[in-house]
Structures are given as C-alpha cells and as structure tokens.
Image (spheres, helix red, strand yellow):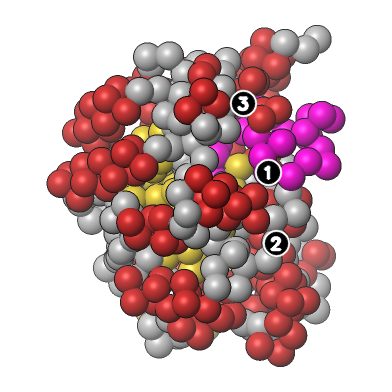
C-alpha cells in the first residue's frame, strides 16, 4: 500500500536537526516514509491533498491503564488521593474479563488516536483469576482492529493486604503464576522487529502492591527475554512513607536494591525525586513518564521536568489511567505539562516545542524504539495532520512548532496515519464504527459496574 501526502503546508519533523519543511510531499510505502520532497514523481493508491494541513509525528503515549476508561468519574472516587482512590477502585476492577478489556482498550485507543497518538503503551496489571493471556489477547486484538501500534505490559501485583500491601486478595496473583505467565506472554506476543505493531514490557505495579521478590525476579526475566521494564515510582508522599517505613529505603533506593534501574527501565510519574536521585537517574539512563493531568487530579504533586531535562534524563508523556485523568488525550497532556511547568518553574520551563518533542521522540526513546517519534525517511509512517483553517487555531497556526502545547486543539486531529494506513479521517475512526463501539461499551459498563 502506498500513500502520498501531496504538498503538505508544513511538516514539524521533530528530527535531530529540528527540520521544518514547507510545501513538500510525503510518500509512504510499505509502512514507512519512503521519501520527503517537492513534486515527488511516484505512484500511490491514495493521494491526499495536504495544501492546508500541518503535519506532526505521531504521538507516543508511555503510560496508561486502558481498562480504567470504564470506571471514570465515579462519584465515590472523586476528591480522593491515590491510596484511598485505589482502595475504592480495586473492588470494581476485580470484575474485569476479556470483553471488558477488549472494549475498554478500543475506547481508550480511539480517543488517543483521535488526539494524534500512533503508539500507545498500556500498563495493565490487574489479572484477576487465571486468564492473563486471554486479557492480553483481547487487548492486542483491539489495537489490531483499530490499526494502532501497541506496546502492552504483563503487569503484576502479588502483595495483598494480608502481606502488608494495599490491594485485596481478589486482584493479586502468586509470584510463580506471574513469572510463568510473563514468559509465556513475551514468547507469544512480543515482536522486536523494526516497525513492530506488537511489543510487550514486564511491569510490576508499584512498591506497595508488588513484593521485592517479584521486582527482582521480573527484572531478571525481562533481561533474559530482551524486553523492557516499567513500574510506578515516586508518585506520592504516601508511597515514600511506605517504602521508608516498610523497607527503610526511599523509593529509588529500593528499586536500586532490586536491580530495577537502568536504560531498559522507565518509571511512571517520578515526582518526589531529590537531587541525588535525579543524578542516579541520569547515571543509570532510566526514563520518566510525566502524567500531569493525573498528578493534578490526585493531588500527587508536580514532577521536576525542567531539572530532569537539564540533566539529560529521558522524559516522555503519558495520560495515565483514564480514571485518574478522566480522559485519554495526549495532546491535552502536552498542554497541561507546558502550563504546569510554567507555574512551577517560570522562565526555566521548557518551551512549547520541547513539549512536542517529549510526546514524540521522548516517547520513542522511553520505549527503546528508533523506528518512530519523528517524520523522517526510513522511519515508520506514523503521523497526524491538522487542517490549519480550523477555527480553534485561528491566529495560532503561523508557528506550528509551538502551536500544540501552547494553544492545543479543541477537537480531534483531522487525520491520523499509522504505518502508512489512514486510521482517523476527518476526525473519526476509519476502521471501526464509533457509535457501535459506544453502544457495546455502554452495555458492558452497566454489567461491569452493576448499574442501571
Ligand atoms: Zn498509572
């Protein structure tokens, strides 16, 4: 399949030279960008006239919990901080089944894709019962149906209340079960090749829901299988209190003691690092996913993003779970991050273009991928288009590099292209019926939440 984007008004490439192209064509063939240039003489099955479109690299979301989109805005979960919020929701999440995972994944992915995201990582860690491979199957099927590039996780929890953890028994599994399933999941689903549509990471949930043994053994297993490692870390002061009380170590020190730090590791949130710990991150190469909406909603705090960038720590963006964000829109995250950093750092805050790069190249680096994250010849044809004649960006489209984080969009992007395939067209999913997805999800949510 070949796709030609003819005469693109402006391409913000986010490549290493920060190239911005004006009025050029992009030729996509076999899933990759085959050429960028003026008046390309090529044959394509489809040609889109892009005279009025701005083009950006597909966004890369590096932290999410898709399933939470079915437990958003629940009255009793509002106004709580992380530990109380989790305790309330664990009791709902124990009812997850493959159908709930498939439909919620499609809904979360749909909203991401409509906001320009082309690659999404999902940190799924709730595997009630015996069906872990079934749940991952349901999730990859959702991504395949919509045409999204997916990095899933075999997440895990094994530390329930009776062992000093936070979750109830109903949502945890044994260490043995988790490790054997993790190996089986990597063998079944993980494709490390260039342009891969399916990858897997191993991801114990958090220091208060996964044991030290599970962290240590998961790290060993991931390294033996060649996959990356992920977990929540330094999200709240409550977590810091937990590790300093239970293990006599601060959270990052605890991770170091378990060999769960390094270039193959990324942490979600990373709010409460002190100066010495930021130096540890710099020296070890671990990456951070910044989730500003969730951090504000759960009153967790504001991550030290400008300090991290100055030290060269890789930073990317994530929407976090839909229930701690009440959305699944990475464009919005970019703008919230930009604004939050202005409040906390003033003129030391990164400019709006730096936020776009965190959401694109930063995400690719976090996931250990050199095939996505910028619009460049040879990379995957993952990008999105915005019509510059939209009213919501009137007066703002003259500076495309900074427009998305500084101004944002008030609706969906116009086109999202993944691996050279049009997956969102005129702001709507191309490969699935949005109304049908809503109806099926609505019925499932009533059953799942037990509401009328
Ligand atoms: Zn999370």
Instruction: Report the span colored magenta.
Output: 57-86
Image coordinates of residue 181 in percent, x first then y, are: 28, 26
Q: Which badge, 2 or 1, comes first in the chain's sequence?
A: 1
Mark linked to residue 82: 1
Q: Is residue 60 magenta?
A: yes
Dot 1 surroundings within 10 Å: few (below 14), some, or many (20 or more)? many
Q: Secondary structure at mark 1?
A: helix
Q: Is residue 419 left or right of residue 92?
A: left
- Left or right of 259? Residue 447 is right
Looking at the image, residue 391 sits to the left or right of residue 92; the answer is right
335 in magenta: no
Residue position marked by numbered label 2 in the rendering: 301
Position of 388 with respect to 157 (left or right) is right
Q: Which label is found at residue 90?
A: 3
Residue at image position (38%, 66%) is 286
| Residue under the image location 56 percent in, 22 percent down | 168
Quadrant in which residue 15 is drawn: bottom left
Q: Sequence-wise, which precedes: disc 1 or disc 3? A: 1
Please state which of residues 357 and 404 is positioned toward the viewer in this rendering: 357
Quote the CA–CA distance across marks 2 and 1. Answer: 11 Å
Q: Quadrant of the C terminus?
A: top right
Per the image, label 3 sits on a secondary structure element best described as helix
Residue at the location (41% across, 33% down)?
Answer: 156
Compare residues 376 and 39 and report the one nearer the observer.
Answer: 376
Q: Nearer the viewer, residue 396 or 74?
A: 74
Kindly report the distance in space between the C-alpha atoms of the residues bearing marks 3 and 2: 23 Å
Residue 390 in which image quadrant: bottom right
Please, is residue 214 above or below residue 349 in the view? above
């Amino acid at each position: 399949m070949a796709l030609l984007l003819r005469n693109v008004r402006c391409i913000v490439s986010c490549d290493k030279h920060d190239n911005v192209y004006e009025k050029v064509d992009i030729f996509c063939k076999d899933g990759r960008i085959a050429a960028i240039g003026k008046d390309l003489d090529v044959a394509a099955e489809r040609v889109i006239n892009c005279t009025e479109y701005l083009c950006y690299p597909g966004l890369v979301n590096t932290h999410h919990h898709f399933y939470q989109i079915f437990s958003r805005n629940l009255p009793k979960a509002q106004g709580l901080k992380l530990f109380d919020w989790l305790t309330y929701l664990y009791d709902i999440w124990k009812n997850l089944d493959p159908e709930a995972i498939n439909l919620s994944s499609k809904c979360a992915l749909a909203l991401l894709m409509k906001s320009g995201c082309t690659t999404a990582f999902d940190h799924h860690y709730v595997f009630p019962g015996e069906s872990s491979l079934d749940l991952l199957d349901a999730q990859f099927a959702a991504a395949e149906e919509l045409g999204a590039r997916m990095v899933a996780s075999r997440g895990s929890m094994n530390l329930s209340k009776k062992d000093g953890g936070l979750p109830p028994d109903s949502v945890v599994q044994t260490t043995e079960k988790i490790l054997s399933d993790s190996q089986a999941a990597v063998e079944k689903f993980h494709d490390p090749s260039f342009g891969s549509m399916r990858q897997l990471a191993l991801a114990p949930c958090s220091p208060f829901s996964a044991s030290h043994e599970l962290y240590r053994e998961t790290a060993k297993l991931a390294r033996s299988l060649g996959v990356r490692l992920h977990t929540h870390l330094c999200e709240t002061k409550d977590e810091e209190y937990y590790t300093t009380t239970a293990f006599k170590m601060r959270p990052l020190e605890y991770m170091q003691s378990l060999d769960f730090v390094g270039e193959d590791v990324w942490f979600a949130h990373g709010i409460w690092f002190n100066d010495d710990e930021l130096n540890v991150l710099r020296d070890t190469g671990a990456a951070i996913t910044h989730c500003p909406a969730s951090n504000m909603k759960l009153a967790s705090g504001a991550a030290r993003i400008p300090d991290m960038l100055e030290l060269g720590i890789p930073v990317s963006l994530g929407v976090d779970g839909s229930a701690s964000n009440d959305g699944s829109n990475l464009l919005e995250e970019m703008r919230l991050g930009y604004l939050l950093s202005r409040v906390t750092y003033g003129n030391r805050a990164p400019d709006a273009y730096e936020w776009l790069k965190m959401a694109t190249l930063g995400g690719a680096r976090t996931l250990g991928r050199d095939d996505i994250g910028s619009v460049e010849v040879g990379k995957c044809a993952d990008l999105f288009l915005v019509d510059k004649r939209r009213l919501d960006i009137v007066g703002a489209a003259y500076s495309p590099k900074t427009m998305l984080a500084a101004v944002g969009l008030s609706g969906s992007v116009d086109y999202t292209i993944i691996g050279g395939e049009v997956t969102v067209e005129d702001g709507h999913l191309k490969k699935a019926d949005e109304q049908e997805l809503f109806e099926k999800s609505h019925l499932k949510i009533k059953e799942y939440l037990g509401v009328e």
